[in-house]
């Protein structure tokens, strides 16, 4: 057996007091002489023998009761595991997520948790070194600290927008071992244990070198309304054009919510108001109509009226109006030129593919008649690799080998023959993601266009994605990806002699979509301390640290990479504050507003049930330490802390036995003696 406070064993010396009282009688007896006292002497001897037994039993019960109380105060434990020798290594996780800002009867949960962490440290006195861990895992001190240093670290921890699960913290503990310390570590997890905190806990396995103990700070599980997300109905709207901002609100309460107020603010002024009703424990999507802001007024804020959890009631947004798509048209085609003129976003110039450069132009439409030269092929390849889009349309008399110069770079299939036959396009192509921005849903009774002559590949797509195909399996529109750019190839000319595609309702949206598809305007908001890339609206040439990310007086050098759809900004893990940031190029004064918001992982206030916590105990091997026992947390350095309750019950039982002896011993022994005398012949 081990003791958390062995110094309390000195209190066992008090057991000498009843023993001394029993051994030394301070009463003096007066002798009275009688003529014949033999009978009385026998009675007196019987009485003294009974009293001696009674006193010994009472003394034993009293000593055992006092000893049980003393042992209870030492907080004993019986540990089936090997006792940890030497100085203990204690690692304490302090949950500092948004949910810990709630209140219970003891006050703010986070302050209660910090106090419990201090009590755990104090319970070890000078017998342990400590590591304090919070949700800001990247800033955890990587070595053990003394008790005073650990207490100072706890004082500095603040609420963070980061939210980690128990599984991730457990994995981090195993992958980040501080230098030195005891090979066997003690881990205390102090949290309100939200349901979200137990995500993926079924994958946790106990560790022989890491003994886990849980301290649950009781939360009330208040209701909450969360403004979860927002997106533009039309991401390509121009400045001043009417648009809709769609948003999703979740009701984490057990009552329906009627007419919740929503406010949209742009450039510090109220732009629009809306209301939304949400059923209990469900989400609903609402919308708010507004006019797209002009350049320089991109900062926007969507607010939900709810006082329960302020961190998820606001979404910071950056609303950039769409600029013109600069298009270079190489070749003449009346139908193509007409389609490009009808799109207000397109700014078209005529020229040669040899002169196309990105980002001076974003799109190249080329009507292919003569074979593409090596110079043109090299220019097209460089253009697409930089992020440009190329759309190839065959001319009426295009040669069979006109595209061979691009086969190696893009994987364009070889043309087998030019076929002249009427053949319709397959309707299944309309379900391709290419048409997501064309149709709200796939039209049910749409008549598909047909071709009269086309360039056949004998059903081969090469390295391309077949967007539209003919009924015989030959492709009509192929898509090829190259780095951040795209190349589209139509296998039939744009003319009435080649088919009725140019007269179809598909023609104009398909032509526009080849230029705009996947050209996402950019993120309208991101998440603080996120590892995901934030898609930028503008292009920044990051060289020699000239591009900086500003927030107040803070200035950081950001990480910018070329992503699938454009340049992506990677938010520093140290950026834990929501709001507006400015990405600035110091040389050319290029600027962009970045809107960052807090994670919504903490929005659901539901707390884990006892059954879920018991399951965590079985899966992860965690032992639960009640909050009121944190002052005696040192007991867990050797095992469980429940044995002290047994000694309390033993003390009560021995005191009860003492009372029973004092009250009933004489009566019971008297009846027993009387029965003996009655039965004597």
Image (cartoon, rainbow, N blue to C red):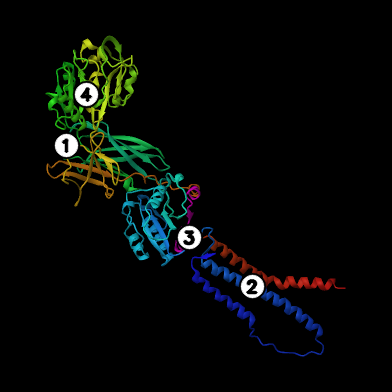
State the residue in front, 351 or 15: 351
**Residue wearing tag 3:** 636
Q: Give the number of the disc on residue 60.
A: 2
Judge left or right: residue 381 versus residue 470.
Answer: left
Q: How crowded is mark 4: few (under 14 residues within 10 Å), some or many (20 or more)?
A: some
- What stretch of residues is rendered in magenta? 615-639
Q: Which residue is drawn at 56% across and 76% down?
A: 14
Marks 2/1: CA distance?
Answer: 91 Å
> In the image, residue 578 lies at what x, y percent?
27, 47
Quadrant where the N terminus sits is bottom right
- Position of residue 73 relative to residue 461, above or below, is below
Q: Give the number of the disc on residue 406.
A: 4
Q: Residue at x 45, y 63 (%)?
A: 631
> In the image, residue 222 lies at what x, y percent?
40, 48
Residue 345 visible within the image? no
Marks 1/3: CA distance?
Answer: 63 Å
> In the image, residue 12 lies at what x, y percent?
55, 73
Marks 4/1: CA distance?
Answer: 41 Å
Residue 445 quadrant: top left
State the residue in front, 71 or 468: 468
């Amino acid at each position: 057996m081990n003791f958390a406070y062995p110094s309390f064993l000195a209190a066992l010396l008090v057991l000498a007091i009843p023993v001394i009282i029993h051994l030394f009688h301070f009463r003096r007896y007066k002798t009275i002489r009688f003529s014949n006292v033999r009978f009385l002497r026998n009675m007196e001897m019987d009485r003294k023998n009974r009293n001696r037994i009674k006193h010994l039993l009472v003394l034993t019960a009293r000593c055992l009761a006092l000893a049980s109380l003393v042992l209870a105060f030492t907080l004993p434990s019986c540990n089936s595991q090997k006792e940890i020798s030497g100085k203990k290594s204690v690692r304490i996780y302090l949950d500092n997520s948004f949910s810990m800002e709630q209140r219970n009867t003891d006050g703010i949960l986070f302050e209660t948790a910090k106090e419990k962490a201090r009590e755990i440290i104090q319970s070890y006195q000078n017998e342990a070194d400590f590591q304090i861990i919070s949700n800001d895992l990247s800033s955890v001190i990587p070595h053990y600290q003394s008790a005073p240093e650990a207490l100072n670290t706890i004082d500095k921890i603040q609420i963070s927008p980061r939210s980690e699960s128990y599984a991730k913290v457990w994995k981090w503990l195993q992958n980040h071992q501080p230098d030195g310390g005891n090979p066997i570590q003690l881990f205390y997890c102090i949290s309100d244990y939200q349901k979200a905190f137990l995500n993926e806990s079924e994958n946790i396995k106990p560790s022989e070198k890491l003994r886990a103990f849980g301290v649950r700070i009781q939360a009330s599980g208040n209701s909450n309304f969360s403004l979860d997300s927002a997106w533009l109905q039309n991401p390509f709207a121009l400045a001043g054009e009417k648009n809709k901002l769609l948003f999703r609100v979740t009701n984490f309460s057990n009552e329906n919510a009627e007419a919740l107020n929503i406010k949209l603010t742009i450039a510090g002024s109220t732009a629009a108001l809306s209301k939304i009703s949400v059923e209990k424990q469900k989400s609903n999507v609402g919308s708010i109509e507004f006019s797209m802001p002009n350049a320089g007024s991109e900062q926007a804020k969507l607010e939900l009226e709810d006082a329960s959890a302020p961190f998820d009631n606001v979404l910071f947004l950056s609303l950039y109006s769409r600029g013109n798509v600069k298009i270079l048209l190489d070749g003449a085609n009346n139908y193509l030129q007409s389609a490009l003129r009808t799109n207000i976003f397109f700014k078209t110039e005529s020229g040669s593919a040899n002169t196309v450069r990105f980002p001076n132009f974003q799109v190249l439409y080329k009507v292919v008649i003569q074979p593409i030269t090596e110079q043109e092929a090299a220019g097209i390849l460089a253009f697409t690799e930089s992020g440009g889009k190329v759309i190839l349309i065959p001319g009426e008399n295009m040669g069979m080998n006109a595209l061979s110069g691009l086969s190696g770079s893009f994987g364009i299939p070889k043309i087998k023959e030019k076929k002249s036959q009427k053949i319709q396009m397959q309707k299944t192509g309309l379900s391709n993601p290419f048409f997501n921005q064309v149709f709200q849903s796939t039209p049910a009774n749409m008549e598909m266009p047909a071709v009269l002559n086309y360039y056949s590949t004998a059903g081969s797509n090469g390295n391309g994605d077949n967007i539209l195909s003919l009924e015989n399996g030959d492709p009509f529109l192929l898509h090829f990806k190259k780095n951040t750019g795209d190349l589209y190839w139509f296998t039939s000319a744009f003319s009435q002699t080649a088919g009725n595609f140019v007269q179809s309702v598909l023609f104009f949206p398909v032509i526009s979509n080849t230029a705009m598809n996947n050209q996402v305007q950019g993120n309208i908001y991101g998440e603080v301390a996120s590892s995901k890339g934030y898609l930028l609206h503008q292009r920044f040439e990051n060289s020699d640290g000239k591009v900086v990310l500003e927030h107040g007086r803070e200035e950081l050098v950001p990480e910018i990479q070329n992503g699938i759809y454009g340049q992506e900004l990677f938010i520093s893990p140290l950026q834990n504050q929501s709001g507006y940031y400015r990405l600035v190029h110091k040389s050319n004064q290029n600027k962009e507003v970045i809107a960052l918001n807090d994670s919504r992982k903490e929005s659901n206030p539901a707390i884990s049930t006892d059954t879920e916590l018991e399951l965590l105990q079985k899966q992860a091997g965690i032992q639960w330490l009640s909050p009121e026992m944190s002052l005696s947390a040192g007991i867990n350095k050797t095992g469980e802390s429940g044995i002290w309750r047994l000694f309390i019950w033993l003390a009560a039982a021995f005191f009860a036995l003492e009372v029973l002896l004092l009250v009933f011993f004489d009566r019971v022994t008297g009846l027993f003696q009387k029965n003996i005398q009655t039965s004597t012949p």
